[in-house]
Amino acid sequence: MGSTQTLKTLALTVATAGAFHEVGTLTDGHFTEAGKTVGGKTAGQYFASADYLKNVAGHAVVGGTASVLGGGDFASGALSGGFGAAVSPATILLNQRVPYTGLVTTVAVGGTASTLAGGTFEQGAMTAGLGYLFNNAALITLDNGYFSDHSALYVEGKEGREAVLYDPGGSYPSKGGGTGDAIYGSEADYNKYSEYWRNNGSNVTIDWLNTTESEDSLIVKNIETLGGRQPFTCALSTSACLSNVGKFNGIDSYFFPGNLRRRILDILNRK
C-alpha cells in the first residue's frame, strides 16, 4: 500500500508540475535570466498585463485541483498556487539582488496562503514551490509532415543562468550561436525557434521535461561538453545530453528524432 501511494503521489506531482508549466507558457509567465518574460515584458510590465491575471488564475485552478486529487481541499490549494504565482514577478526582482530568494519567498507565501485557507503550510509550500521550480527544460521535435526529422533542447534561464537553446546539427540562424550549436541568452527563444520552423513548413512539438534546477544545470553542462555537432546527429546528441539526468538517466542513444520523442513520452507517462 505504501509503495502504491508513493507512486500515486509521484504521478500527481509530475502531472501538477506539467500543468503549472503549461499555464506559464500560455500566459507568457516564464522569465528569462534578463528579468523579462519570453515575450519581452519586464516584471513591472507583466504585473500590469492581462497575462498576469490569467497566470494567477491558472495557477490557482491547477493548485486547487491538485489539492483535491491529493486528498485536500480546493481552497487551500488554489490559494497557495495562486498566491505563489501572484508574487512571481516580484521574486524576479529579488533574484536579481539575492539569488534563490525567489524560491524561498514563493514557498513561504504559498504555505501561508494554504494555512489561512485551513490547509497545511507544508502542502501549500510544496504546491507553490512546484509552480516555481518545474518550469525549465523541453525537448523540441520537428516533423516535416512525413516523419520527425530533427531534435533540439531548450533550457530556461533562471537564478543567474542564461537560457540555452541547443540545435545540434541544425540550421537555425541566430546572432548568438551560429548554426548547429548552443544559443544563449535572449536569442535562445523557443517561441521564435518554433515560429521559424513552422514558417518553413515543419510541425513543431514541445514536450516539457519537468526537470529540477540541478538537472537543468547538468543538461547545460552536457550541452557545453558536446558543443556543435555534425548534420544527422541531432537525436544522438540530444539523447547524450539527457542520458545522465534524473528520470532520463540511462536513456538509450537514438538516431531517429521520432524514436527519441516516443521514449521521452514513455518516461514522462504521457503516451
Image (cartoon, rainbow, N blue to C red):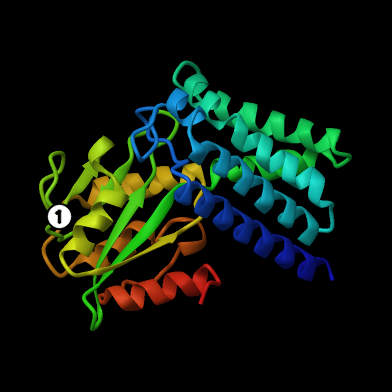
Q: Is residue 159 above or below residue 28?
A: above
Q: Position of residue 13 (x, y in %)?
A: 66, 56
Q: Amino acid at mark 1?
A: Tyr
Residue at 70 percent across and 29 percent down: it is 109
Residue at 32 percent across and 56 percent down: it is 153
Between 219 and 38, the residue placed more toward the observer is 38
Q: Is residue 87 above or below residue 6?
A: above
Q: Position of residue 232 (x, y in %)?
A: 15, 70
Residue at 29 percent across and 45 percent down: it is 189
User: Along the horizontal axis of the image, is 39 left or right of 175?
Assistant: right
Residue 100 visible in the current orientation = no
Q: Is residue 207 above or below residue 99?
A: below
Which residue is disc 1 drawn over?
172
Between 167 and 83, the residue placed more toward the observer is 83
Q: Quadrant of residue 146?
A: bottom left
Residue at 50 percent across and 38 percent down: it is 50
Q: Position of residue 39 (x, y in %)?
A: 35, 40
Q: Quadrant of residue 80?
A: top right
**Quadrant placement of the N terminus:** bottom right
Residue 270 visible in the current orientation = yes
